[in-house]
Image: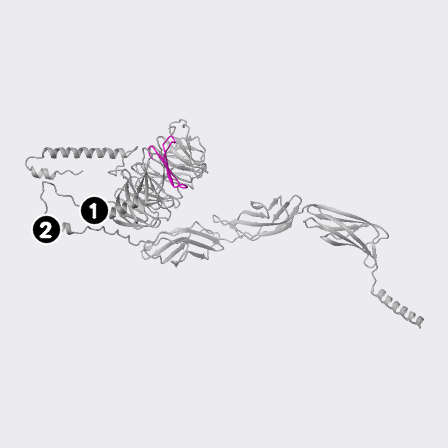
Amino acid sequence: MYVDVAGEGTEKKGRGLGAAARTRLVVAFLVAGCLALIGVAVAGRAPMPSDLEYVQSGHWVYSDALQSALHVDGGAGQVDARAGVPAGPGSQVVQGGRSGYVVDRSRISMFDKSTLGVESAIAPPATETPSVLEVAGGPYLVYRNAGRIVRLGDPVATVAAGGPLSSPVATTDGTLWVYRIDTGSVCELPRGAATPTCPAQLPAGHSGLPALVDDRPVLLDVTADTLSPVSKDGLGEPVAIGVKLPPTALVADTSVDGRLAVADPDRNQLHLLDTAGLGKDGPAGHPVSVDLPKDGRFSGPVATAHVVALVDETRNEVRTYDSRGSLKSTKKVPGAAGRPRLAHGQDDRVYVDSADGSHVLVVDGESGSVADVAVDEQARHQAATPPPAPPQPSDTGSAPPPQQQQQQQQQPPSRPAPPPVARATPPGAPRNVNASASDGAIKVTWSGAADNGARITAYHVSWPGGSTTVAGSARRATVSGLDNGKSYVVTVSAVNSAGTGPGASAKAAVPGQAAGAPAVTLTAALGGKVSASWSAPDLHGADLVHYLVSATGAGERQVSGTSAQFSGLTGSVTVTVRAVTRYGSGAALTGSPGKKTVRVPSGPPTVKITHVQGRGAPDQQIIVTVTANGNGAAATCKASALGGSSPSVPCSGTTNLTISNIYWVGAIPVDVTITTSAGTGSDHFQGTPAFVVVLGPLALLGTRRLLKKTGKTEAKKET
């Protein structure tokens, strides 16, 4: 509204304000008062933050195509501001009282919301996409995997939470609440605090999700399926929610008409949990459950005072429900393919950004209706439209001189200045830093860090007791000469012309030597049974964790002792045994394999006597020829007769068994037995062995002379 008071006052100087002027002033004061009341009403269900003159209205989105942050007025459905800020695709924009922040994986660029100019850029503490919260004292960026919280409000700070975090929530007084996934602790970071405190703890083995009910923190225990209020004194009395939830459940940031929205992605359901019994020692009402599309994959939910919104990523559409579970609206998300992003605005609307930032869907927090704002199209149209003509002077003033009018007409329209480019800053932290230990050494690998405007010239690798520098193109390094059994944390940081960026550390690694190969012994029996035993190998001073034992056709198992039994096996079976050891808190080391192969018998063994022959002096032997069949198992055979026996020898197919130093006359009994792990078999012979004459050297000489003499006599007779 334009109120011209100066003209009236000038014209009627000395007489006070005229009636028209007084009327206009009254209207102006009434409008200002109404606007103030509207500002209080927009604040919703909680008091307005004391440090903000107004609740932050609307929503900022980053357009990949325009390389700009654009402000969307959710009520009007219009783009009303644009700040040119170079950033990577898929960047987020979050706003504070006076500044906006474009957040990508390698930098956080700050721009002034009044001038729309870039002011500075800082490096984030991690390269993951953070969760963002616009609240008093903030905004906040929560890097969940890294366990870091960045407060962009006053004072600016990066707070270490100590471990991985769940999705955060924040009350209107600026207190941030997070859940430590690794310890089960519920922690708060009050406005302006530098260190979080953790007043509540879930039992070991339980998983939790924080949320807000009437601007008070609560914790949903998805293991026990209970809901508990959280205070500085710990967890309050839990209330059963009346539905079974999986560990993958997703909870809304705040309640909707006294119910807390929870999405079950395993069963594709939306549950609206009754919160009336919290803190009142009363039972909770029955939950309202809504079936979602069976083949859908969902993100969200996000709740306003009266509406729940979530995105079906399979169909790329927004779905809204009221607190009774009634579907209010569905709408496709326009723009490029990709994962849309939901945000809960301080004006109690839900904003859904398309993957490329070209569209924003605005969900009305009262009715659940959804409107599309074509962000890129509006911004381009505004840039192509000439600026409006300057306001004409009032009828009480005089027109500018003709020369000035001509200059105004000839003056070309000013073009907007190009957005400032953020200066180079030290690199971001390297990504995916991993360390693997070996004998006296650690190999560390990483993915490249963001260069932040200047080429990375080197990577600095450090560990307790030493450091080294490798080329900027390197992605791995090996640190040798380390002590086995000692824990080392290796840190990698990138270097460019602007300085050295933040370091990223791998998990602690402990060098050590893997165990040797165990000596394996096997026996096989009928029914596909194989028994394995082994001797402990050289552990090289490490602690034994367990053995990994595998058999052909039976998979792998963990064994704490030195034996294992298998069943249901057939054919040739190889058993492999490896010792798994650990030095202190280091990673497990898998030792060299010990192997042994055995054939599993398909039935009991059989043997058949095919021939028995005897030899006289000097051998005095009976030789028994058999056909042996172990039916897949190793077999031994033995023959016996007249109190003598052959040695037990391996037998398969045609085999000779020799009984030595035996004397006989006429028919004799001969018995043969075959033995395998599956049992024994036998055969019997009764008869006279075939006699074999063994001639010694003297006997052979006498025979030759006799033959010669006989030959001469025959010749004389013929003569």
Q: Residue at x 57, y 47 (%)?
A: 549
* Residue farthest toward the left in the current orientation of the protein: 14
Q: Is residue 430 visible?
A: yes
Span highlighted in magenta in the image: 304-329
Specify the amino acid type for callout 1. Answer: Pro
Give the quadrant of the C terminus. bottom right
Specify the amino acid type for callout 2. Answer: Gln
Q: Residue at x 23, y 51 (%)?
A: 417
Tell me: residue 249, above or below residue 703.
above
Along the line of sight, the residue nearer the viewer: 241 or 395? 395
SS at mark 1?
Answer: loop
Name the mark on residue 403.
2
Alpha carbon distance from label 1 to label 2: 22 Å
Tell me: residue 154, above or below residue 220.
below
Mark 1 = which residue? 387
Q: Residue at x 86, y 52 (%)?
A: 666
Q: Is residue 488 visible?
A: no
Name the mark on residue 354.
none
Q: Is residue 31 magenta?
A: no
Q: Give the mark nearer the N terminus: 1 vs 2.
A: 1
Q: Position of residue 535 (x, y in %)?
A: 60, 50
Q: Position of residue 177 (x, y in %)?
A: 36, 38
User: Pointer 1 and pointer 2: residues touching (CB < 8 Å)?
Assistant: no
